[in-house]
Image (cartoon, rainbow, N blue to C red):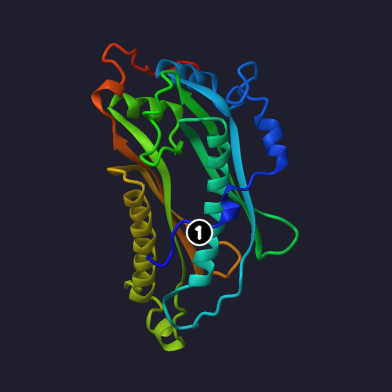
């Protein structure tokens, strides 16, 4: 695989401001308060599952995207742009996970990964990863990844609860990306299609290949994390600042593994219910 998680010492870097904030949360100080982006219902469900929130964790990376050349009439991956989108996201994710490790967390739930731009230039992007660090009340660490680190997951607290009830636990929020240049059509080809119902194979093939590259890379991350499967897979098509024929295909999901019997939720654990209101 030409692209992988960023192996960069800066990935574990934490600003001093983060250390000050984390030192006063429940994960670092027994007398501290927890912070979270959980709703009241999600907080209650986590408690039912035997987990407690420790603190709101965040990772950020502001990244300058380099120059990329592309052939006007050829379908091709834009590898400079793909690597930039990978590296920036992974730096943000790694810093978020470093904050969770700082709190002694077993995992991070509700991971949200977003991108935003500033006025400094259209080739400068910020990637921000956020979530709530949680810890199991047993203190055994059985829910951590096979590597002994906090798991990451974009599942809601409700889906996290159901996953635990099914005897599984998240391992990692995994992603695969591909920035791809979809070839332009020639003049004669465009004229032949005027008024006709017909497939545009050049576009179909390009989009197909780009999507498959993103999915394969996501699966590779799950295998590397020693997961048994991926749930909640989503493939987004994103147009950023590179022009209408350069598109990013982003595949994301939560890699999971099976828990041993002694760590599964008891059969007597209360089941979540869904209440439909009658108010309009």
- Residue 209 falls in image quadrant: bottom left
Q: Is residue 209 left or right of residue 4?
A: left
What residue is rendered at 28% in x and 11% in y? 268
Give the residue displayed 49% in from the left and 34% down from the top.
108
Relative to 115, is 139 above or below? above
Give coordinates of residue 55: x percent, y percent. Answer: 59, 28
Q: Quadrant of residue 165?
A: top left
Q: Quadrant of residue 30?
A: top right
Label 1, on which residue? 86
Q: List x then y, in percent, for residue 43.
A: 51, 20
Q: Secondary structure at mark 1?
A: helix
Position of residue 61 relative to residue 122, above or below, is above
Can residue 244 be seen in this snapshot?
A: yes
Q: Residue 270 in the image: x percent, y percent?
A: 34, 12
Mark 1 burial class by Cα count in 10 Å: few <14, some 14-19, many 20+ = some
Q: Position of residue 79 (x, y in %)?
A: 48, 71
State the residue in front, 69 or 188: 69
Q: Residue furthest bottom?
A: 188
What's the residue at 31%, 43% (across, down)? 227
Q: Is residue 128 above or below residue 7?
A: above
Left or right, 208 with respect to 69, comes to: left
* Residue at the farthest left position: 261
């Amino acid at each position: 695989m030409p692209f992988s998680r960023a192996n960069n010492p800066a990935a574990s870097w934490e600003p001093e401001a983060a250390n000050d904030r984390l030192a006063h949360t429940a994960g670092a100080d027994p007398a501290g308060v927890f912070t979270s982006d959980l709703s009241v219902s999600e907080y209650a469900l986590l408690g039912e599952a035997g987990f407690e929130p420790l603190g709101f964790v965040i990772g950020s990376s502001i990244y300058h995207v380099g120059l990329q050349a592309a052939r006007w009439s050829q379908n091709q991956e834009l590898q400079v742009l793909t690597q930039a989108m990978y590296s920036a996201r992974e730096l943000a994710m790694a810093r978020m996970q470093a904050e969770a490790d700082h709190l002694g967390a077993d995992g991070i739930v509700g991971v949200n990964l977003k991108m935003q731009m500033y006025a400094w230039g259209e080739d400068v992007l910020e990637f921000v990863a956020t979530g709530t660090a949680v810890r199991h009340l047993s203190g055994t660490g059985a829910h951590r990844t096979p590597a002994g680190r906090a798991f990451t997951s974009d599942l809601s607290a409700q889906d996290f609860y159901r996953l635990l009830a099914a005897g599984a636990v998240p391992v990692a929020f995994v992603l695969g990306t591909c920035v791809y240049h979809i070839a332009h059509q020639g003049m004669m080809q465009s004229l032949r299609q005027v008024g006709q119902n017909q497939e545009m194979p050049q576009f179909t093939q390009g989009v197909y290949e780009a999507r498959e590259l993103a999915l394969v890379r996501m699966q590779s991350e799950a295998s590397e994390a020693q997961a048994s499967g991926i749930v909640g897979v989503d493939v987004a098509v994103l147009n950023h600042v590179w022009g209408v024929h350069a598109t990013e295909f982003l595949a994301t999901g939560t890699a999971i593994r099976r828990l041993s019997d002694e760590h599964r939720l008891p059969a007597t654990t209360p089941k979540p219910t869904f209440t439909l209101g009658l108010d309009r």
